[in-house]
Amino acid sequence: PRPLERVLVTGGAGFIGSAVLRRLLTRPVTRVLNYDALTYAGLRESVAELEANPRYGFVHGDVLDTARLSDAIRRFRPDVLVHLAAESHVDRSIAEPATFVRTNVEGTASVLRAWLDYRDEQTRIDASAAERLLLVHTSTDEVYGPINAGDFAGASTPYNPSSPYSASKAAADHLVRSFGRTYGLASVIACPTNNYGPRQFPEKLIPLATLRALRGEPIPLYGDGLQVRDWLHVEDCAAGFEAIAERGEVGETYHLSAAASPSDTDEWPNRRIVEAIADAVGELQSDGAERRQLITNVSDRPGHDRRYALDSSRAREELGWGPTIELTDGIRQTVRWYAENSAWVAVAEGGR
Ligand code: NAD
């Protein structure tokens, strides 16, 4: 295993990044540097309790700024860089695709450039230490496009992205693999399914539905609500990133998903997710009001994929990773977190 003594995380003020930082700081000696541009989705409040930790550092910077990122890398001297910074919301990518090309494609090219230069410098200083440097890049189940019921996407399933978001993520993955072949740059790709849990920006399905239900407001549901996602709790995902950074084999792609096999038929369409949220809010507020009636069908997202599903057997078998939080419990816990963290919610909603 790699020691993970110094880990630079891009996008650490975001939803998954802040969970990865929290997870890494539970290790006794690991030092982390959070490099984040603090876009609308990046919140200092998501890492506020880490700031007192002397093993935590923060640089306010854009991944597109290669010189600034290079400088942060040279000063911090990480042994692993986990690249999570991205524009992540599919609906925004439909409205403004160019932003997604800039951050996700050009931003990844910039991270690769900075990391390659660092590797080359380190090789001149200490070649055997430089051989252990690792880039962990983040993909998404969406790069494979819709997957038929009963099927799983494997790491060699062809890419078939449907949205500007997933197309930009696919392009970034290709760049990462190309740097492996062209420059021998050591990387692994972590590819998680839909995450949910505390600190997810309230434009995404689960936090949006939760806040609407808590306020007794209409809960929008796209189309027929029968789209199937594989829901992974963000803490399980963060444990997967730690395992990949520590023990992942260079050049591999590790899928992280909740379902263990394609015959796992306990799939939750979006309608069942929002019903579970409405029920969890009902339990919490215990006023006897029926919240499922708040669910309101709205017209479907264009290009909306029907189903995503990943084969995560490599991560399970090679890394001993597996999810630990069951979906019903995870939704209850998440609903409680949003109910109890109105200060975080107010910042995320821009002072609402
Ligand atoms: P998020 O939108 O919550 O956070 C993104 C973070 O990146 C924010 O802190 C933002 O400030 C930062 N950022 C954005 N542009 C930047 C730039 N140009 N320079 C520096 N920082 C920048 O996203 P998330 O949900 O935490 O997703 C993290 C990663 O995981 C992304 O790469 C995303 O594509 C991937 N992913 C997410 C999910 C999911 O369900 N959330 C699933 C699969 C893959």
Image (spheres, rainbow, N blue to C red):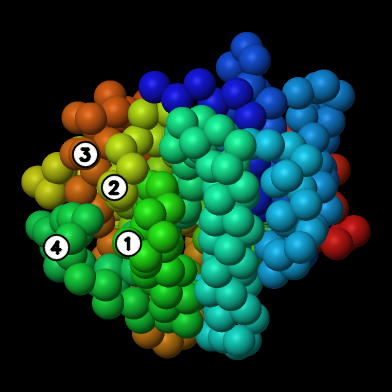
Residue 251 shows in the view: yes
- Label 1 and label 3: CA atoms lie apart by 22 Å
Residue 118 picture location, percent across and down: 62, 49
Residue hosting label 3 = 314
Residue 14 picture location, percent across and down: 67, 51
Residue hosting label 1 = 181
Q: Nearer the viewer, residue 183 or 332?
A: 183
Mark closer to the observer (2, 4): 2
Quadrant in which the C terminus is drawn: bottom right
Residue hosting label 2 = 252
Disc 4, SS: loop
Relative to 209, residue 28 above or below: above
Residue 52 placement, left or right of 246: right
Q: Nearer the viewer, residue 260 or 124?
A: 124
- Mark toward the start of the polypeptide (2 vs 1): 1
Amino acid found under the numbered disc labelled 4: Ala
Residue 102 picture location, percent across and down: 62, 78
Quadrant in which the N terminus is drawn: top left
Residue 291 shows in the view: no
Relative to 203, residue 55 above or below: above
Residue hosting label 4 = 149
- Label 4 and label 3: CA atoms lie apart by 21 Å
Dot 2 alpha-carbon crowd within 10 angstroms: few under 14, some 14 to 19, many 20 or more: some
Q: Which residue occupies 66% across, 52% down?
A: 11
- Mark toward the start of the polypeptide (2 vs 4): 4
Amino acid found under the numbered disc labelled 2: Glu
Mark closer to the observer (2, 3): 2
Disc 2, SS: loop
